[in-house]
Image (tube, coloured by chain):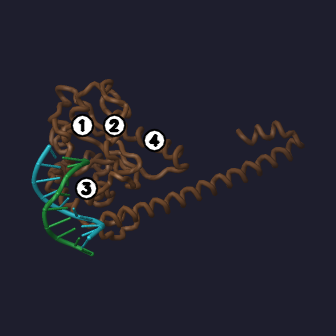
Chain colours: A brown, B green, C cyan
DNA sequence: GTTCTAGAAC
DNA sequence: GTTCTAGAAC
């Protein structure tokens, strides 16, 4: 079997049979796997599990096949993926705080023309700093404003719109509609600056990331200092009130 | 999806 | 001469 169908294989497999290096976690309906070639610091894929007969491989081939079929079933699958994604996002944010001391954005969305078979939702941190991000196609496929990357929020909104709009959006899901976007020029998603080529874009993205890290760390530091000042102030107020009973006043300050 | 590599771009 | 891209093969 080709690598292009590897996700389909995972989606059929009993989760217990998948190695921990591939599978992050699973539920009755979905699998969360580590992207084999992460295009950012954090990058997961969420796949709906194949469950015959309704959730078969054909229906779950990609977003187009799913939304071209039963609309209620499509909404169920996508909503379930969204709920899973929210959990994964929280876990990513915890890891961000542990490893970096601050949080940054996490994007959740589908590719307009995925090259691998089987529906997969990307949950990816908004840095796009990774050795595995090598080509214009890689970058443009995750650019948050280009249109190839379809944010979960937007996809869900189709289901709330009127049926005419919904079917119009379904028709737009032909690969021929989104593939040309991958060939667009390279624009930094932070500052819109145009970059000549991939090496200069990657260097620029790293600089943007370094700036963001510096800003976030400074603001975290300011926040800690303010908290310390507030704590000290409340302690001195309570100790004044209680005429020097330091053990009770420090307990009060903490609560 | 990646890898490989010819030839375009610099 | 080296860097970079993009298309074929897998």
Q: In the image, residue A7 lies at what x, y percent?
A: 24, 37
Residue at the spot x=81%, y=48% of the render? A237
Residue A119, relative to residue A10: is it above or below? below
The residue identified by callout 4 is A90
In-front residue for pair C7/A123: C7
Secondary element under disc 2, as helix, strand or loop, is strand
| Element at label 3 | loop
Residue under label 2: A33
Q: Residue at x 30, y 30 (%)?
A: A29
Q: Is residue A52 left or right of residue A229?
A: left
Chain assignment, label 2 = A
Looking at this view, is A9 or A108 the one in front?
A: A9
Q: Which residue is mark 1?
A: A7
A253 left or right of A209 in image: right
Label 2 Cα neighbours within 10 Å, binned few <14 / some 14-19 / many ≥20: many
- Note whether A170 is above or below A56 in the view shown: below
Q: Earlier in the sequence, mark 4 or mark 3?
A: 4
Q: Residue at x 23, y 38 (%)?
A: A74
Q: Which residue corresponds to mark 3?
A: A148
Which numbered disc flags the more N-terminal residue, 1 or 4? Answer: 1
Contact, CB < 8 Å: mark 1 with mark 2?
yes
State how far apart marks 4 and 2 are (Cα).
16 Å
Q: Which element carries disc 4, helix, strand or loop? A: helix
In screen coordinates, is A99 left or right of A175? right
Q: Chain of mark 4?
A: A
> Residue A255: horizontal and vertical position, in percent?
70, 38
In the figure, residue A136 lies in which quadrant?
bottom left
The answer to whether dots 4 and 2 both sit on one chain is yes
Q: Residue furthest right?
A: A243
Q: Residues within 10 Å of mark 1 (few under 14, many from 20)?
A: many
Crowding around mark 4 (Cα neighbors within 10 Å: few <14, some 14 to 19, many 20+) is few
């Amino acid at each position: 079997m080709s690598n292009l169908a590897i996700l389909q294989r995972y989606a059929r497999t009993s989760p217990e049979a998948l190695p921990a290096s591939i599978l992050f976690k699973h539920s009755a309906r979905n699998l969360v796997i580590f992207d084999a070639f992460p295009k950012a610091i954090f990058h997961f894929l969420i796949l709906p599990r194949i469950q015959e007969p309704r959730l078969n491989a054909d229906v779950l081939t990609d977003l187009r096949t799913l939304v071209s079929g039963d609309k209620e079933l499509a909404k169920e699958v996508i909503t379930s993926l969204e709920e899973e994604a929210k959990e994964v996002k929280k876990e990513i944010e915890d890891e961000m705080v542990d490893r970096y001391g601050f949080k940054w954005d996490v994007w959740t969305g589908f590719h307009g023309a995925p090259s691998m078979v089987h529906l997969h939702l990307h949950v990816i941190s908004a840095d796009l700093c990774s050795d595995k991000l090598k080509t214009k196609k890689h970058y443009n496929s995750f650019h948050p404003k280009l249109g190839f990357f379809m944010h979960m929020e937007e996809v869900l909104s189709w289901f709330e719109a009127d049926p005419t709009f919904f079917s119009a959006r379904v028709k737009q899901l032909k690969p021929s509609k989104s593939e040309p976007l991958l060939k667009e020029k390279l624009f930094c998603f932070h500052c819109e600056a145009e970059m000549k080529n991939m090496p200069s874009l990657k260097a620029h993205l790293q600089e943007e990331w370094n700036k963001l890290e510096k800003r976030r760390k400074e603001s975290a530091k300011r926040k800690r200092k303010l908290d310390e000042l507030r704590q000290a102030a409340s302690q001195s107020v309570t100790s004044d009130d209680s005429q020097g009973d330091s053990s009770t006043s420090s307990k009060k300050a903490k609560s």
